[in-house]
Image (tube, coloured by chain):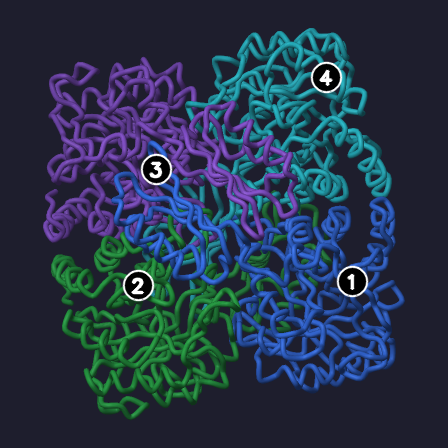
Chain colours: A green, B blue, C cyan, D purple
Amino acid sequence: MILVFRQGCTREEVAYAEEKLKAIGMVPHTLCGVERTVIAAIGDERKTSAEELSIIPGVENVLPILAPYKLASREMQPTPSVFHIGGSDSPCGGTSNRVEFGGKTIPFIAGPCAVEGRSQVLEVAQAVKEAGATALRAGAFKPRTSPYQFQGLAEEGLEYLAEARDATGLPIVTEVLTPADVPLVAKYTDVLQVGTRNMQNFLLLRACGAIRTPVLLKRGMSATLEEYLLAAEYILAGGNPRVMLCERGIRTFETYVRNTFALAMVPALKEKSHLPVLADPSHGTGVRKFVPPMTKASIACGADGILIEVHPDPEKALTDGAQTISVKDFAKLIKESRAVAEAVGRTV
Amino acid sequence: MILVFRQGCTREEVAYAEEKLKAIGMVPHTLCGVERTVIAAIGDERKTSAEELSIIPGVENVLPILAPYKLASREMQPTPSVFHIGGSDSPCGGTSNRVEFGGKTIPFIAGPCAVEGRSQVLEVAQAVKEAGATALRAGAFKPRTSPYQFQGLAEEGLEYLAEARDATGLPIVTEVLTPADVPLVAKYTDVLQVGTRNMQNFLLLRACGAIRTPVLLKRGMSATLEEYLLAAEYILAGGNPRVMLCERGIRTFETYVRNTFALAMVPALKEKSHLPVLADPSHGTGVRKFVPPMTKASIACGADGILIEVHPDPEKALTDGAQTISVKDFAKLIKESRAVAEAVGRTV
Amino acid sequence: MILVFRQGCTREEVAYAEEKLKAIGMVPHTLCGVERTVIAAIGDERKTSAEELSIIPGVENVLPILAPYKLASREMQPTPSVFHIGGSDSPCGGTSNRVEFGGKTIPFIAGPCAVEGRSQVLEVAQAVKEAGATALRAGAFKPRTSPYQFQGLAEEGLEYLAEARDATGLPIVTEVLTPADVPLVAKYTDVLQVGTRNMQNFLLLRACGAIRTPVLLKRGMSATLEEYLLAAEYILAGGNPRVMLCERGIRTFETYVRNTFALAMVPALKEKSHLPVLADPSHGTGVRKFVPPMTKASIACGADGILIEVHPDPEKALTDGAQTISVKDFAKLIKESRAVAEAVGRTV
Amino acid sequence: MILVFRQGCTREEVAYAEEKLKAIGMVPHTLCGVERTVIAAIGDERKTSAEELSIIPGVENVLPILAPYKLASREMQPTPSVFHIGGSDSPCGGTSNRVEFGGKTIPFIAGPCAVEGRSQVLEVAQAVKEAGATALRAGAFKPRTSPYQFQGLAEEGLEYLAEARDATGLPIVTEVLTPADVPLVAKYTDVLQVGTRNMQNFLLLRACGAIRTPVLLKRGMSATLEEYLLAAEYILAGGNPRVMLCERGIRTFETYVRNTFALAMVPALKEKSHLPVLADPSHGTGVRKFVPPMTKASIACGADGILIEVHPDPEKALTDGAQTISVKDFAKLIKESRAVAEAVGRTV
């Protein structure tokens, strides 16, 4: 931690701060400049916070040196995490294919926004598999902005998803909304998705840390990189190492898209963390026409996987139709994505 | 709903859209301009969404006419809601004073960020009461950005809060983090607080709608006015009418504050909704020095209550010390606020 | 400057950085922690920049200690600047009243968005004077988002403004758009306004620094506090000390207002700078109904002046009608503002 | 335009609005719903504005149907604009190569942020040419946030740029800051760049519309798509058809980058406008490491050109070193970009 004192601070204030820093196990080095006195404090910053130290009398500003997350960092693990989902050892006991994340191949997790019924899920699962998808996504529990909108089929939806897995071999990715539902959802799914609005639902993160099912943690709509990796840290600190990150668009002043797809987050996360980083161009833009170009852009800048909304008949989708592409367009996109992946030394 | 078609749309596309609108009970009026064809559809928009209609072939843009919330709106109830918290009929069965919200008097809900221990809570409750506070706030369950930070005393903290209420008569406002904890927290508190990070935790909102304890719903860090009132709608639709709103700062590019205190939200919410609107200058700025001027600004622009962090010794606070004011400064602020309140025809 | 090295940096990298810092006149103090090596460099940071030093090999992060502005800072001048505009020594040679800024009294600069004609300006000048305004604002050169909108009356408009000053004694505040027009506009006006879109038009700032006319510099729509004070620094560094700042709303994700009125900027600027800080609730919100409450909020949090759009018939205004209040509403607002000003120890 | 009236509006208010609309040449169609009365007004919306109509008594909301720009729109010209810069007919009379924009090939405009001296420019021009660049960029006039930073070599810099063009054949792209300098800069350069901070410097846009030199108009830091195309409209309306757009990052709450690179703007602009759309990954991120992946992402999502900062020795660059890549890295990036371009059916 670097403590910068206001101009004209007193000796007593500096001495008091030195004592305070020693008391929490840090070693203060005090430097007196012409305009400012500065204390550089060496030690484990994670025991304190910039905010906590900023209220020491005479201190004008506190600058942290270390990132506040540890298990999620590249320093903890310098090489990228590579792990699989699904397979014969999937915690849900399903019979899905084993799909690797973090390696050379870029998996596509495709499917409708919501599970709307048995036949819809079985149909779309078969269709996206044929088109080249490696996992199936669909929500049985839906977080909806308005209480008057469709809220999902709940456990019935989970059953259909499990049936679709049995039929196609595609591992399942589905969202869980609350800690109490974690055991239920984990019984059916290969990957638990923690959605954007729950990125800082810390009790849910803890519950996900306490199980062995891999977790897909989506970035919050206004989360900084640091807050995002701290959210992942909650899960990792609980003992669950299989965490996937996913850029899905942030909230800014832009209105021609539903969200601003902040794609530089992909290389940035990969620099700071060893965890696989996916991209979700469907929510990332919210506009169907922009999904294909932004999928290719995601691959070009290094995404380790793609999460994408596909529906047999997007116009009839109960939720998120405006950003959902058709199965036909998805099949075309997979082909085009393959070419881009090869251009950057990867495969789809 | 207004459906704007792209230039060069076909007759068939327009006819198809007309049928689709009729099918959901709306009456389409089609207008052919030189540059664009437009359908103005009259009826209950809340059965559909702009997004859903935007995927009709040929449609370029959909503009909603009505707000998507209803129970929270001024149209539902043209006069401001006035209700009390605490009192002999408080659902928690406590013995607190009755405090009115939405009326001429502006209550101050004051207290530390977190319950840190029994004596701290009892001491601060007594101190803020003497300074002029009308309710006590403190968190027993704390949502913290990092897993390595203090997470609250949980039920032990709730017990201390109840004891502080008995000692001072101040009604209690405390946060609940997850639906499963609602009955527990409601047993102790006069008001359930739903925090910023949970504004769109829809299961929590439903759980709060199912009980009779008043709810203080804080605005999400990147929530629009419409999303915010839809979140309130979840609670109201559950049958719980006592919902208080609270502007607490949003996330923008500004860095000299922790959050940008968007105070025009106060008159804006009061124009659209009948619910009382509070302001939280502590989180709204995140900087102790700005709390007094922004408290006075909140009152000047019409806030119906103030939520404020006060600690006997802010430097020793376990959480949020940087934005917490001392009891002495709080007593001074209450006096200054009283003068501003009178200048705008209200009382503190 | 604090230079934080990446984990595993080499001795050579640290030595190289030390040399580099010495070469620009700074004194490096190197501290080797367990996780990181840090150099605290003492000296005049303004000769370099964090960005420039961040590219030294091995450096992961650079943290500045000092603010990059100097003349605008409280350190340069610990007490608030108090100065007047207009009066017998006004550089334009007019005959306006002398109006003080930065003192106990809070001046209201009122008038229409644009000069639309001679009689409009004379009428509104007389009306706002009677209502209590202390200066007149109106644009003769209008920056307009679309090339198809009214662009202002140019010099003809300036002449009407000068005539309105002669008739009422109100000093004139009007915008200048480009360096080449500075001498022309300065010939007519008591205060040059540099608008939001020009806050970083550095040649215009230099031109304003080279004359003696006071300058009202509005905050840019996405300017940080630091960028804003650096813009003021351009004018001050040119030798023109009479610079007024003005918060006028920033661009965020909010849509119920045209801009987000970031009022905590008022106490923040007053803490960092000695310059007077005004507030513009008309642009700050963009919504007429919110102008009165936000004017009172501006005064309550310490604004040193109010800039406000008033039109005899807002519905007929050629520009900005949606945020303009009527003369009648303005007269009422002045009265209400007076009460709030007195409540915070000031006068209107 | 769609005018939505507040609940409980009067017949007189609706009739007045109808008259008002007719008076400006629009045809009103009034629809009375249960909850709201709506007028759909057909005609040329560009003669008025939503804001202007929103102040009609009784009107709650106004929704425009048409985009406010025309010449820049796809409706004006359904196929993409393809045009060249440089060549024997370059308005500056230079002897540069002819480079096409808007076609299958994606030009790279590369060079240092600022012209620092004669040998630097000649050296870098030669180097980027050999690496594969098709045009040279460098600033002779630099807009700098602080008055204490290097401000550019002005005309001396322009002369070095012209010399570099003669030596290499690369067309020149350089920034102009103020209308008065347009003739001077146009004398030397093949393309005038209007920078981010000047996107709404309307007098500069007009001056650029009045000449024949192609213009590279960078997106403003907080500009919406509509404001951006209206800025282009200023130049087009002046009679200059060769306008290139460029996404260069926007200001949001993100801090791990200097700007948030909003790449979905590329397909969005190409959908709404026929003008070529470039991308600037250097300013778009502000971080050197992210420039190569984001360059490839720009190409993958359809950018028609790349603007990139390259310096022989980035560590010694006087400006923007943190986001500048070396010539060696640039040569490597060109190769990698070529592969991505081919994967999306284009060439570099």
Which quadrant, please, contains the C terminus of chain B?
Answer: bottom right
Dot 2 amino acid type: Ala
Residue C184 visible to the viewer:
yes
Chain of residue at mark 4: C
Query: Disc 4 vs disc 2: Cβ atoms closer than 8 Å?
Result: no
Q: Nearer the viewer, residue B47 or B270?
A: B47
Dot 4 amino acid type: Ala
Residue B82's tag is 1
Residue C125's tag is 4
Number of other residues with Cα within 10 Å of mark 2, as a class: few under 14, some 14 to 19, many 20 or more: many
Q: Is residue D294 left or right of residue B171?
A: left
Query: Disc 2 vs disc 3: Cβ atoms closer than 8 Å?
Result: no
Residue D289 visible to the viewer:
no
Dot 3 amino acid type: Arg
What residue would you read off at disc 2? A279
Dot 1 amino acid type: Val
Relative image position of residue D55 (x, y in whole percent): 60, 33
Relative image position of residue B40 (x, y in whole percent): 44, 46
Q: Which quadrant of the structure image shows residue C120?
A: top right
Q: In this rendering, which labeled residue sits more in front, label 1 or label 2? A: 1
Give the spatial CA distance, label 2 vs label 3.
Answer: 36 Å
Helix or strand or loop: what does disc 2 sit on? strand
Q: In this rendering, which labeled residue sits more in front, label 3 or label 1? A: 3
What residue would you read off at disc 3? B36
At 59% from the left and 11% from the top, the residue drawn is: C157
Q: In this rendering, which labeled residue sits more in front, label 2 or label 3? A: 3
Number of other residues with Cα within 10 Å of mark 1, as a class: few under 14, some 14 to 19, many 20 or more: some
Helix or strand or loop: what does disc 1 sit on? loop
Looking at the image, is D308 positioned above or below residue D208? below
